Image (spheres, rainbow, N blue to C red):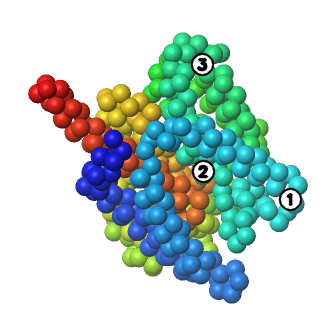
Amino acid sequence: MLERLEEFFPASVDHSLLFVISCLLMLGLIMVYSASLPLPSDNERHLFWNQMRGHPLHLLIGVIVLGLFLLIPTDVLKSFSGLLFTFGLALLFCVGLLKFFGGQEYIRDGAVRSIPIGSITVQPAELVKFFSILFASAYAIRRNDRIRGSLIQGIAPIGFLMVILITLLLYQPDLGSTIVITLTVGAILFLGGMNLKVFMPLFFGLCSFFVLMIVNTPWRLGRLVSFVTPCDQEFSATSGYQLCAALVAFGNGGLSGTGLGTGVAKLDYLPLPHTDFIFAVIGEELGFVGVSIVLIGFYYLIKRSIEIGRTAMSQDRVFAGLVAQGIGFWIGVQAFIHAGVNTGILPTKGLTLPFISHGGSSMIVVCAAMGVLLRIDMENKFYSKSEPTYINKNSNG
């Protein structure tokens, strides 16, 4: 069966989906360079040259990883889902140890989120986003009869693991990744058959937990308050500065933008223009037209993920279906939060824009997820074509 599937490749790859992925990746390469142009030219810490070297390398590795995951059967991913999730938890634990024992040299922007390995750093939270999708999808199948009716037997095991995961992420701290992973795992369990009477209390309980945590953390509460009127004199120079600068960038861009490379928000006005606020740079330099094209690209990707997942589930390949829809949900939630923060719809929270923002771990993991999504679609087409052939052979025999 595997040999026959490999003969079906690469003609069965979704070329339209691959085209959208390629366009988003190339736009990211261009916008990262544009957003990094005005950075100061210190020979050792010049971020522009780091982007010049690093981002194309991350992109190249990401494309290679995408190709590798395109060759891995989904059944293999299912078999290793528990091991991968455990590996992700172990990496997060190592980050916690770095923060506890490592000292100030590992702290970046008030947090420790990466593990240095030689000249590179690995951000485990990005890996865990992907591993959590695989693990939750496999879990929903193994305990399907229990998650449909029993809170204790069905949800308690994965709930215990999620408590460990959330604790490790919040210790960094990384609230953005915590929200994305929690929502994605919850969505997968719900799609996998979780009883609504069990799901709704858990959902509202988690929402209450996050609200209480924000209210009881002064700097997070400050961001929430300033988000309503970020450009007021009281907030414009403190907690509302980032959002105010982003809104000014969108205003400067107008309909068609100021032109690629000609934006002014990145000239030390807008913090982190190459990562957390790259959507605002797109809005200023490419305008409403450019922003709309990006959003249409994400819409198509999410739509295809849902369609691919539904097709797989209609073929009784539930794990593949849940993974595909989980990937779409993850990309959609993260892109929505990033765009919402940049446009003032949501309070300020640092999250990268998938495919586009600078960041090696994020880029490679997203490409791996796209490889899995394309693989699932390829298997869908193979099984939809092979099954009628099998039936015809029996009927003729």
What amino acid is found at the position of numbered circle 1 in the picture? Gly
Residue 127, disc: 2
Q: Which mark lies nearer to you, 1 or 3?
A: 3
Residue 102, disc: 1
Camera-side residue: 157 or 306? 157
* Local crowd size for mark 3, using a 10 Å CA cut-off: few (<14), some (14–19), many (≥20): many
Residue 45 located left or right of residue 280: right
Marks 1/3 in contact by CB < 8 Å: the verdict is no
Q: Which residue, as the protein is rendered here, is positioned at the far top?
A: 149
Residue 154, disc: 3
Marks 2/3 in contact by CB < 8 Å: the verdict is no
* Residue 103 sits above or below residue 8 on the image: below
Q: From this viewpoint, is residue 213 visible?
A: no
Which residue is located at x 65 percent, y 86 percent?
41
Distance between the Cα atoms at labels 1 and 2? 22 Å
Tag 3 or tag 1, which sits nearer the N-term?
1
* Local crowd size for mark 2, using a 10 Å CA cut-off: few (<14), some (14–19), many (≥20): many
Where residue 355 appears, as percent x and y from the top left, is: 47, 60
Camera-side residue: 38 or 344? 38
Tag 2 or tag 1, which sits nearer the N-term?
1
